[in-house]
Amino acid sequence: MNSTKTLHDSVQLGELKLQNRFVVAPLTRQRADKDSFIPNDVMKEYYTQRASFGLIITECSQVSKLSDVFYWSGGIYSKEQALGWKKVVDSVHEKGGLIMLQIWHCGRSANISQLGGKQPIAPSPIAINYKSRATGEDYPVPHELTIEEIKEVVQQFKQGAIYAKEAGFDGIELHGANGYLVDQFLRDGSNKRTDIYGGSPENRSRFCLEVIDALAEVFGYGRTALRISPTGRFNDMYDSDPVGLLSYLLPELDKRNLAFVEFKRHGALENRAVVYPDRKTPQEQMPDFFRIIRKLYKGNIIANDNLSIEEAQELVQEEVAQACSFGYKSINNPDLPLRVKNGWKLNENLDRDTLFTQGPKGYTDYPFHNQE
Ligand SMILES: Cc1cc2nc3c(=O)[nH]c(=O)nc-3n(C[C@H](O)[C@H](O)[C@H](O)COP(=O)(O)O)c2cc1C
């Protein structure tokens, strides 16, 4: 179906009214304070620079010390972290922007140097089958969560949502993508449980839906969202039947009337995937990714991964997606929506060496159009 909708039109996603359909994709940039994981002034400036996007989704924010892979990531498990985020949020609001927190637990991909001798946690005792980027070492075999421990993790997410609400965020997005804890439960390559949290798509979706419901108790469903990457391979992930999983999960999400689901298709991050000869490729599993999703999900869709402006425009016009999120393009174009609207050239220079370094270099020094 073709419509006259464009990326520049406003859109209502649940209770969020976006001024346009450009979304800053969640991007870990490791600029918070190292030991406290408190968001700071350079982060405030970075996010505020992007207030002309219809919506900013923050970097993934960990719900506990054990739930983190990276150093210098802004956490959401202490009052001080919430206060740090509040400065970011207030500043984005002053510029008329909307900002959601991406809430996260990394599960089996935890950085062992941050675990203080503890084992990472996961649905099943299956390690990631390559070396950790953070430590250069093998990933340890994770501890299989008991049902009681699963409930505790759900509560950690809820407490994180309470802090996020105190910080004034406009909503909350659960990170269910890229092979972290929620994704580890969803997919059958990492979830071999035989209890109510494993086996059928219904059982594998249970943890995700319990966390969504816990977040919505704090924010309401109209300000709660989920990100998933059902065919992604990053962090050694696989599901033998992603369409089967989605055929259960997405109608369940539809019942809840979320603000949106952000779908990340198989893309550039997958370069480090282990190749298993017996596994189907993502393209074999879901050839026309977004159009398959559109048939399975009635609610609002944010599309992501390696989208050109033209493809994003097409998805919005055909109402396959209500909005599109941009990762790399939002790093080097803080004013991306204005550049596209006015026909100004996009900045193509991206410094990969400063993606995960600290301080303003390669973070807040990308030029606005009028500074070029
Ligand atoms: C530096 C960097 C950090 C990222 N951090 C996150 C993150 O914190 N949470 C998340 O869900 N995805 C994260 N991603 C994935 C991006 O949100 C996005 O899916 C990916 O960059 C593909 O979109 P793009 O082609 O528009 O950049 C990250 C990607 C990059 C390059």
Image (cartoon, grey):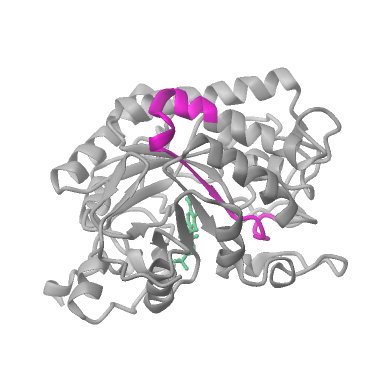
x%, y% of residue 311? 44, 76
Question: Which is nearer the eye, 66 or 332?
Answer: 332
Q: Residue 364 falls in which quadrant of the image?
A: bottom left
For residue 333: magenta?
A: no
Quarter of the picture holding the C terminus: bottom left
Q: Residue 39 falls in which quadrant of the image?
A: top left
User: Is residue 110 visible in the rendered structure shown here?
Assistant: no
- Provide the residue span drawn in magenta: 213-235
The residue lying at 25 percent from left, 74 percent from top is 340
The residue lying at 68 percent from left, 60 percent from top is 233
Q: Is residue 215 above or below residue 372?
A: above
Q: Is residue 252 above or below residue 299?
A: above
The residue lying at 60 percent from left, 55 percent from top is 229
Label total for image: 0
x%, y% of residue 10? 25, 57
Residue 330 shown left or right of residue 315 in the figure: left
The residue lying at 62 percent from left, 63 percent from top is 292
Q: Is residue 219 above or below residue 342?
A: above
Residue 313 shown left or right of residue 239 in the figure: left
x%, y% of residue 278? 88, 66
User: Is residue 283 visible in the rendered structure shown here?
Assistant: yes
x%, y% of residue 268? 56, 70
For residue 229: magenta?
A: yes
